[in-house]
Image (cartoon, helix red, strand yellow):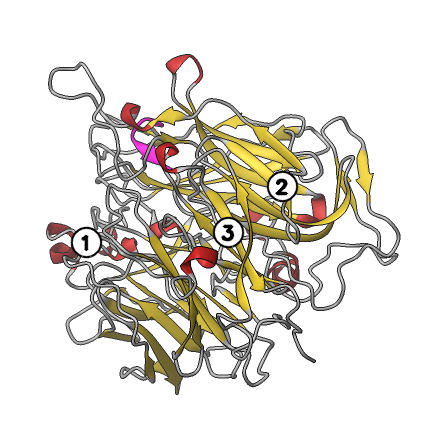
């Protein structure tokens, strides 16, 4: 097995820049312009000669576009601030599926599909444990569809009630628990990696799957049952702490780095006892096997410390892996090994490298205003390199990844910190199309805000603020703005911020939503799905799921209970007959 922590830095740089980001011509093709995708029976499906993606075509192979989780697509050549208007832009078609969607739709262009030729494909995963490959441009019936096994009814999650007759269940997740996190696609090897919960014979297990991109079928050696244990003195552990599949949720999107798939865990509904975990699995195609996992426990001498980040994926900058940790024990500053309420950096073999904990972590724990509610973002082009993020307090932190600072003080809490909004769920997005990074943040009951950077720090007064506010009172009810941003590089009139918002409180409920497009410079509204609701309605809000922007189209997950019709992906773009212009 290749040791993941010691791969050459040049390999990592290639991974970050090309193979697993949203970028031009992310093809994974050979010099001859050919692409072959493996099938589970040991064969391959080959693309036609010349089937490599055209220059400028974009793959979105991982949540929020890249392993920095910027949420930006800088190669959008069709959609502009001029043509994203109600007269020219709207819903083109929908892709119905069999379960609620909490995973961001992913895009693979010019990929061969068994018995179906070469297609631009959108991959959709559901909580019914189903995965679909649809043609990304025309909709219609799935190119392939697989169901990986029975999902867990949401009533069967968590500990038993006091009478011992029924589990407490989870209403944060409606109906069933299946594929909860966003998968990641390994285009170079023609594979899809994902995790799910299984309920075979009423036994709950966590599964890690490696699927063929060509067929959707499990590759040889897949799936593996996810298990982990560490020595520790934490809550109810005795001397060993074990990952309990009934209490734990694998919410953050998967990270693929150096051939290893990293996944993080928190709890369902804060049901105790639980701990935060990060695991790393690797698929060995030659041996037809999934390796035993790398394992890190966040609080082995304490409790809690879940990593959920509102579905944002673990990050990587080529030197390590980053996460935001939620409420939990904080003993690392006094020589212990628990990292609650932290920005945390690990090596690729999951050894702690550095961390930052706010000085007021006790208050954050006591008042349940954890930092881990929001997902962090690595900001491109900063020197020294910076990571930013925040949580329920609404404070935005800027942390130097080469010297994270450990425990902050009242006067020196991070490189920068300020009250940016009311409460942060989901994640900000960063746009570098204009050169200096711009950060977009939509907090609870607050307008969408745009922050600029100069001198390596944020300007603490927003440079632009939207007029749109979805007011749902009471911090903690997470009416998150799920964001993405697109542009054709620095071309004038192409920067657009896309935002999905709920219209009612989505906590413990499935509620209607609204979908917006804003000018990325001014935050003036360009379009929203209510302007022509009969045509463009965004349906039921998919909590924490960002829109996916690629190749002139926007893919928006929607969630509906079975009584309200099927969940689906709504696909938006220029209406038929509209000229995209030069």
Residue 240 position (above or below residue 323): above
Pointer 2: what residue? Answer: 133
Percent across and percent down for residue 341 are 24, 54
| 220 horizontally vs 130: left or right | right
Percent across and percent down for residue 382 are 46, 77
Residue 127 position (above or below residue 156): below
Percent across and percent down for residue 425 are 29, 57
Pointer 1: what residue? Answer: 476
- Which of the two residues, 101 or 195, is positioned nearer the viewer here? 101
Element assignment for label 1: loop
Q: Earlier in the sequence, mark 1 or mark 2?
A: 2
* Separation of marks 3 and 1 at Cα, in angstroms: 28 Å
Task: Please tell me whether mark 3 or mark 1 is closer to you in this view.
Answer: 3
Q: Which residues are magenta?
A: 245-249
| 203 horizontally vs 435: left or right | left
* Separation of marks 2 and 3 at Cα, in angstroms: 15 Å
Q: Earlier in the sequence, mark 2 or mark 3?
A: 2
Q: Which dot marks residue 570?
A: 3
Locate the C terminus and report the quarter of the image it occupies. bottom right
């Amino acid at each position: 097995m290749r040791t993941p922590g010691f791969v050459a830095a040049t390999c990592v740089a290639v991974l970050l820049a090309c193979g697993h980001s949203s970028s031009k011509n992310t093809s994974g093709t050979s010099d001859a312009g050919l692409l072959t995708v493996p099938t589970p029976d040991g064969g391959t499906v080959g693309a036609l000669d010349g089937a490599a993606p055209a220059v400028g075509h974009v793959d979105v192979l991982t949540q929020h576009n890249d392993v920095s989780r910027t949420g930006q697509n800088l190669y959008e050549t069709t959609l502009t601030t001029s043509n994203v208007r109600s007269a020219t832009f709207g819903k083109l078609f929908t892709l119905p599926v069999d379960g609620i969607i909490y995973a961001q739709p992913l895009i693979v262009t010019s990929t061969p599909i068994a018995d179906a030729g070469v297609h631009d494909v959108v991959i959709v995963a559901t909580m019914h444990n189903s995965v679909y490959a649809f043609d990304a441009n025309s909709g219609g019936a799935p190119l392939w569809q697989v169901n990986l096994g029975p999902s867990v009814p949401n009533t069967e999650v968590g500990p038993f009630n006091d009478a011992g007759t029924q589990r407490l269940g989870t209403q944060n997740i409606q109906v069933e628990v299946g594929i909860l996190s966003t998968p990641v696609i390994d285009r170079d090897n023609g594979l899809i990696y994902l995790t799910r919960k299984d309920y075979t014979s009423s036994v709950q297990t966590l599964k890690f799957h490696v699927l063929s991109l060509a067929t959707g079928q499990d590759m040889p050696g897949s799936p593996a049952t996810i298990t982990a244990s560490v020595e520790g003195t934490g809550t109810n552990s005795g001397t060993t702490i074990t990952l309990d599949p009934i209490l734990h949720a694998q919410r953050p999107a998967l990270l693929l780095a150096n051939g290893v798939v990293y996944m993080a865990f928190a709890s369902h509904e804060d049901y105790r006892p639980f701990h935060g975990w990060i695991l790393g699995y690797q698929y060995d195609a030659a041996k037809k096997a999934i390796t035993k996992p790398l394992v890190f426990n966040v609080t082995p001498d304490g409790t809690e410390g879940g990593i959920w980040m509102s579905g944002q994926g673990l990050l990587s900058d080529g030197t390590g892996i980053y996460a935001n940790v939620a409420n939990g024990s904080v003993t690392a500053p006094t020589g212990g090994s628990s990292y609650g309420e932290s920005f945390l950096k690990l090596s690729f073999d999951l050894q702690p490298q550095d961390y930052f904990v706010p000085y007021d972590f006790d208050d954050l724990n006591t008042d349940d205003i954890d930092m881990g509610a929001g997902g962090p973002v690595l900001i491109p082009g900063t020197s020294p390199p910076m990571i930013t993020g925040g949580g329920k307090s609404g404070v935005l932190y800027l942390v130097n990844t080469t010297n994270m600072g450990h425990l902050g003080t009242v006067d020196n809490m991070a490189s920068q910190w300020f009250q940016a909004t009311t409460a942060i769920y989901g994640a900000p997005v960063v746009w570098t199309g204009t050169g200096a990074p711009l950060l977009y943040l939509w907090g609870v009951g607050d307008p969408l805000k745009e922050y600029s950077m100069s001198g390596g720090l944020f300007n603490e007064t927003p440079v632009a603020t939207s007029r749109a506010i979805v007011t749902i009172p009471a911090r903690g009810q997470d009416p998150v703005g799920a964001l993405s941003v697109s542009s054709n590089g620095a071309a004038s009139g192409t920067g657009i911020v896309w935002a999905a918002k709920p219209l009612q409180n989505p906590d413990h409920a499935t509620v209607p939503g609204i979908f917006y497009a804003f000018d990325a410079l001014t935050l003036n509204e360009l379009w929203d799905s209510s302007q022509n609701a009969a045509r463009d309605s965004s349906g039921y809000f998919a909590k924490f799921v960002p829109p996916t922007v690629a190749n002139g189209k926007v893919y928006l997950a929607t969630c509906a209970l079975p009584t309200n019709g099927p969940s689906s992906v709504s696909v938006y773009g220029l209406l038929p007959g509209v000229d995209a212009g030069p």
